Every structure is written in structure tokens, then in C-alpha cells.
Image: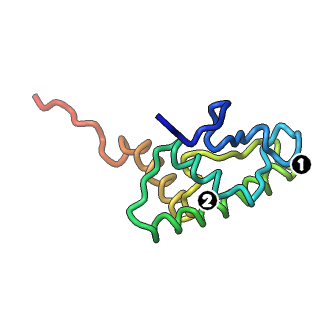
């Protein structure tokens, strides 16, 4: 069965660790590799988009988030590392919505107190 993986098993022969711009431990991605990275991202996270317009919207979000990953990882003031994850194709609004949903779920016992047994 033929696939798009290179000889070393990487999708399209691309290895984000080996193909970084510099040798720093924090990833810095070449924006020219965004199409290749996005295809790998879709496969890695089993992403599905409803149509071409939705695909393009999420691709654009992905590129903007790659820029932000590069900015954060280039800044010596940040001790943390940012990288591609399941949310990299989300807009800021989508990420904020996801975060607020998680907070609401964590606090759901306050919103919906446990039912006590009636005697």
C-alpha cells in the first residue's frame, strides 16, 4: 500500500525536529513549510473539515498560530515552549471558547450541585 511517508516513516519526509531553522530545543518553523506541516497536522490529529472554505479558514488559523509559536519560542523571556498541538488550527475565539467550556465543566458541581437522597 503506497503512502505519503518518506523512507524514515515521516509524512512527506518532513521531521519537525530535524527541519527546524536552528538547533535550539524550542521549535521554530519555516512558514514556507506550512502546507506540508498542515497536512501532517491533519493526519496526526485526524482533523476533518466540512468543505474547502472551512479547510482554508483552519489553514489560515494554523499559519497564524505557527507565527505565534515562532514568536514565543524565539523570545528569551519565555521559559516555556510552544508547539503544534490539537488546537493549532483554532482561532483565538475558538481556543477561548474551548477554555471556558473546560472551566465550566470543572465547576459543574457548583452549577449543578450533587443530588442528595431524600428520606
**In the image as oriented, which residue stretches furthest toward the left?**
119
Q: Nearer the viewer, residue 112 or 36?
A: 36
Task: Residue 6: give x, y in percent of width and height.
Answer: 64, 37
User: In the visual, does 94 lie left or right of 20?
Assistant: left
Q: Nearer the viewer, residue 38 or 25?
A: 38
Q: Check disc 1 and report the residue beneath it.
A: 76
Task: Residue 10: give x, y in percent of width and height.
Answer: 64, 36
Badge 1: residue crowd in 10 Å (few <14, some 14–19, many ≥20)? few
**In the image as oriented, which residue stretches furthest toward the front?**
2
Residue sitting at x 76%, y 38%: 17
Q: CA distance from mark 1 to mark 2?
A: 23 Å
**In the image as oriented, which residue stretches furthest toward the bottom?**
53
Query: Which colour assignment does the render follow?
Result: rainbow
Residue sitting at x 57%, y 62%: 59
Comparing labels 1 and 2, the label whose residue is closer to the camera: 2
Badge 2: residue crowd in 10 Å (few <14, some 14–19, many ≥20)? many
Q: Check disc 2 and report the residue beneath it.
A: 62
Q: Secondary structure at mark 2?
A: helix
Residue sitting at x 34%, y 48%: 111
Quadrant in the rendering for residue 23: top right
Position above or below: 69 against 44 = below
Amino acid at each position: 500500500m503506497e503512502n505519503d511517508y518518506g523512507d524514515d516513516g515521516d509524512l512527506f519526509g518532513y521531521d519537525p525536529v530535524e527541519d527546524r531553522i536552528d538547533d535550539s530545543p524550542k521549535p521554530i518553523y519555516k512558514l514556507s513549510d506550512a502546507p506540508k506541516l498542515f497536512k501532517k497536522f491533519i493526519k496526526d490529529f485526524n482533523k476533518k473539515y466540512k468543505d474547502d472554505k472551512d479547510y482554508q479558514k483552519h489553514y489560515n488559523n494554523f499559519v497564524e498560530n505557527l507565527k505565534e509559536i515562532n514568536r514565543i519560542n524565539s523570545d528569551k523571556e519565555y521559559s516555556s515552549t510552544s508547539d503544534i498541538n490539537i488546537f493549532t488550527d483554532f482561532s483565538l475565539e475558538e481556543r477561548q471558547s474551548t477554555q471556558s467550556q473546560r472551566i465550566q465543566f470543572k465547576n459543574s458541581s457548583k452549577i449543578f450541585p450533587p443530588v442528595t437522597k431524600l428520606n
